[in-house]
Structures are given as C-alpha cells and as structure tokens.
Amino acid sequence: MKTALALAAMTALLLPAALPAQNAADPVFTPASMRAHVEFLADDLLAGRDTGSEGHEIAARYVASQFDGLGLKPAGDDGSWLQRIGFQRTERTATPAVLTLTGPGGTKSWTHGTDVIVGLNPDEPKVDLSAPLVFVGYGIENARMGLNDYAGLDVQGKIVVTLRGYPKGLPSEEGAHLSATKAKVAQSHGAVGMLSVGTLQSMKARPWARMLAFANDPDFTWVDTDGKAHVDAPGIRATATLNEPAVAALFAGAPQSIAAIRKLADKSGGKPKGFALKGSARIQVDSVGKRVSSPNVVAILPGSDPVLKNQYVVLSAHLDHIGVSEAKADDKPDTDRINNGALDNAAGIATMLEVARAMAQSPQKPRRSIIFLASTGEEKGLLGADYFARHPSVPVSQIVGNVDLDMPLLLYPFTDVIAFGADHSTLGPIVAKAVAPMTITLSPDPMPQEGIFVRSDHYMFVKQGVPAVFLATGYANGGEKAWGDFLGGAYHRPGDDMTQKIDWTAGARFAEANYRLTLAMADGDAPPRWFAKDFFGDLFAPQAEKASH
C-alpha cells in the first residue's frame, strides 16, 4: 500500500474475527473477515514484517490477541503466546568478498555481486580459504536412488564444484530434498568449500538476475539454547555460486567441457561424472554478526476426545516477510520500498486465523488437539518452523500431522489445489476427500523446477518425521497465468500489497478448504501415516507405523 492506514489498522484490531458459525458442520467463512486480517498485517505501519523488526513484533501481538479472543490456550514460553527465538544476523562488511580462480588459463578474480555470489559464514567472520577443486556432478549421494556422485573421488580438504539442482527424471520432492542436503554430504566427505554452477534447467528456472536480486541479503540462523548459532554443515567454510564468465574459467582445461556436462545433465537420467579440476580457488569474505530476537506465536485448541486429545495436528503459516528494500540511486522521493507481503503471507495467516475461529466457535471441538503456529524467519530459510519442530510446545512424538499455509494466490477463482508433500502419506487421500464436497480437485506439482517442497515450513516437520502437507491454489481456471504473472511481478516486491485485485471470495473458500482438511486430520480414527516404503517416511520416521497404498 502507498499510504499507512493507521486508523484502519486500529479498527481491524477491534473488528470481530468473523461471523459466528451457523452450526458445527457449516461454519461461515466470509470475504470481509479474510480481508480485515490482511489489511492490518499488510499495512505500511508494519513495514514488511521483517524478522527481528518492530513491524513483525506488532504483527505477532495482533495474532496473539486474536488467539486470546478465541479462547485458545497459549503455548509459547512460560505460559505466554510467544516462543521467543534468538537469531544470528550475519552481514557483509565494506570489504567486498572475492573469488579467485587459478588454473590453465591463469589467475582471475571476481568480486561478490558481479559474476559470483559469495556466501557468508556465521561461524567465521573472516574467511580466507584456498584449496584444490574437484567437480562432483550434482554432489548427491543416496543409495536408494542409485546416486553416488562421490564414488572414486578424493575431496578431503578440497573445494567441491556441484551442479545446481538434481538429475532430470528424479521425483521432484525427493530431488528437492537431496539438492538441499548437498553441503552436509560434501562435509561428510571432508570437503571444506563448495562452488555451484547452473544447468540448462536450473538457469532457466532461476536466472542470474533473479539470484543477484537477493545476493546482499543478510544471512540468518537460529541460536540454540546453548547459545551457539545453528549451522547445518559447519565444516563447509566457504561457498559461492558462479555465473558464466567464472564458470568458463573454472572448467578451463578440464577433461570434459561444461557444455558437454550440461548437455548430459539436460537428458532424463543424465548423471555427469566427477573429476579433479586443473586448478584451485581462493575465497575471501569478511562479515559481521549480531544477535536479534523474533517470536513464533503459538496457541492450542484442546481436543475433545479423552484419548486422542493427547495427539496434535499443527496448522502453520509464516508471519514474517522481507521488510523494506534498499533505496536505489535512481529512486524518486515517493518510491514505494515497503514489501507489504499481502499474499506472502498475510493471506496465509488470515487463513489460519479463520480456521482457528471456526474451530474455536464450533460447539463440537475437534477430537485431536490443534496447534496454531504463526512462525517467524520463514523468508530467512524456514528458521522459525525449524526451531519449533526441534523445540515444540509438546513432545514431537505427539504431533501426528502438519498443514502449512504459505502464499495462497487469491487472484482468481481457483478450482483446484496442489498438495505439496501429500503423496508420501495418507494425507493424500485425506486432502482429496476433504475438499471434494467443495468441487475442488487435487492436482500434481505443476512447477517441480522451483523445488517448492523444501521451500515452505512443512518441510521442517517432515524432517522430524511428521507427515505434512502444504496446500496451494492450483493452475486450473486461470491459475497458471496468475502464478506466472505474480512470480514474475509482485512476488517479493512492494507490489504485493492491497492494491492488487485480490479475490476475497476465493480467500474465504481457501479458508474453508483448509478447515475441512485440518478437521479431517483431527477427527479421523487413525492419525496420518507415512506410506510403506516411502522415501521420507523411511528416512525420517523409520520406526513409525506405516500405511499401505
């Protein structure tokens, strides 16, 4: 929005959450109630709800007040609504990071933000790493999928070079997970650094200009109860992503050209083999870190069944967004730089609040207990959800399922939904059955190249062995164009505000769909179960009782 509507914001706090439900089977979901929540959360007053900001703190209090008004139980720290998380925010210094490559073509250097993007190290404020280079294909290792890109390669004390993404033909969600764990695999083989280069597919999905747009963002990681910043692969001291001029220098004199490697990688099942490169790299990067704090907001609706109330379904949505963009030299005085995050993800929070309202006001409560989680730090790497999944309000063994709400695209009258993650468990048929009375169909992932499965909060519950699903509006009935326009336009920009032609009727319909799904999970005789021999069920919940397909 162009103007901060402070009066409207305060009015939104005083509005009733929604019309009361008519009866237990037919709760009312209104466009006005959805709009009221989003109007407040996406107002300029909150300055984009950045993690650790005052705007996010205001948003957290808003959500807590809504929970309180519904009569839910606080499930944060010490009987409060807030689960306070410490974060380390690592930023660049005035000294630019540099990548230097030495090989058959001589020595060449690039500063961060030109043709290289150099990562930050929260554990090491001044990195100066030099090591030989080894190309390791995609850098993936998984016996079940028949992948062992490190076979026959010695990478101890070296910098590995990986292709971005995963082999064509690999199931998208398994591939996205394996791609997200490359640093840990490299560390397990003794590597100390990692460079990544694009494939034809990955460069089309995420062009260099799109990557550069976020290259100077600070790095965030949560701080554990022992005071140490959490890092997935602390042995990988330095990382960088390379554009074409640097890639050409990297593969100068290599046994196989980058063009040939990319051609093979672009074939279904193509698995380029690794080899030692004829050169070395030096990565220099200085950073400064500081500690900040930001809360999750957590509430519980106790279940009605004397036995099943000790099992919990988590309905989650991220409350944070990306704050205010840096000013550019050519900005006009009235340039809008506030990233309001109306759809990403004020709309998801509004959906969660409306589901909470419907369940809390129903005379017949769900059989299982429901945890409502408004997470922080999602835009920084799913950090708030990761922290909660590792430090939950109840033992994680009692959490039987998760539904995540992230960026519902409420710009068209959707007729289908995509249930990311649902194929791995009984959540698939639960979702399909739950939304069928609304004449909503279930569609497969239409954009597997985006790796959405590992980019939303439900993934952090999956990693703790919890069956989880992320519901998104689908591609039918104009959805494909709406998604394309949004991702190429307002997404993560000031345009994601209340000036968009948001379809609030679609918003009410989306809330009803998620209400039906969450209630089905809470009321079923059996909890959601991983399917037998499922990749994620076997990996993260090997001892859990499985279901047959």
Image (spheres, rainbow, N blue to C red):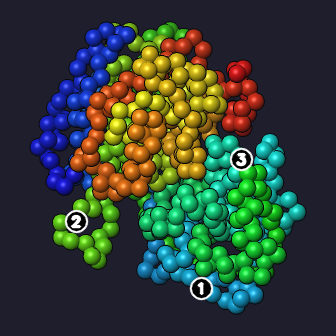
Q: In this view, does 35 lie to the left or right of 74?
A: left
Q: Which residue lies furthest to the bottom in this view?
A: 106
Q: How crowded is mark 2: few (under 14 residues within 10 Å), some or many (20 or more)?
A: few
Instruction: For the residues labelled 3 and 2, say whether their Cβ atoms are less than 8 Å apart.
Output: no
In the image, what residue occupies the spot 25% across and 16% down? 20
Circle 3 residue: 169
- Mark identifier at residue 109: 1
Q: Can residue 405 be seen in this view?
A: no
Circle 2 residue: 335
Instruction: Measuring from the top left, give residue 513's x and y in whole percent.
Output: 42, 24
Mark 1 is on which residue type? Ser
Dividing the image into 4 quarters, which one contains the C terminus?
top right
Mark 3 is on which residue type? Gly
Instruction: Measuring from the top left, give residue 460's x and y in whole percent.
Output: 56, 41
Instruction: For the residues labelled 2 and 1, say whether their Cβ atoms are less than 8 Å apart.
Output: no
Q: Residues within 10 Å of mark 1 (few under 14, many from 20)?
A: some
Asked where in the image residue 232 lies, by quadrant, the reply is bottom right
Asked which secondary structure carries label 1, the reply is: strand
Mark 2 is on which residue type? Thr
In the image, what residue occupies the spot 22% across and 65% down? 335
Instruction: Measuring from the top left, give residue 503's x and y in whole percent.
Output: 29, 36
Asked where in the image residue 135 lies, by quadrant, the reply is bottom right
Q: Which of marks 3 and 1 is in front?
A: 3
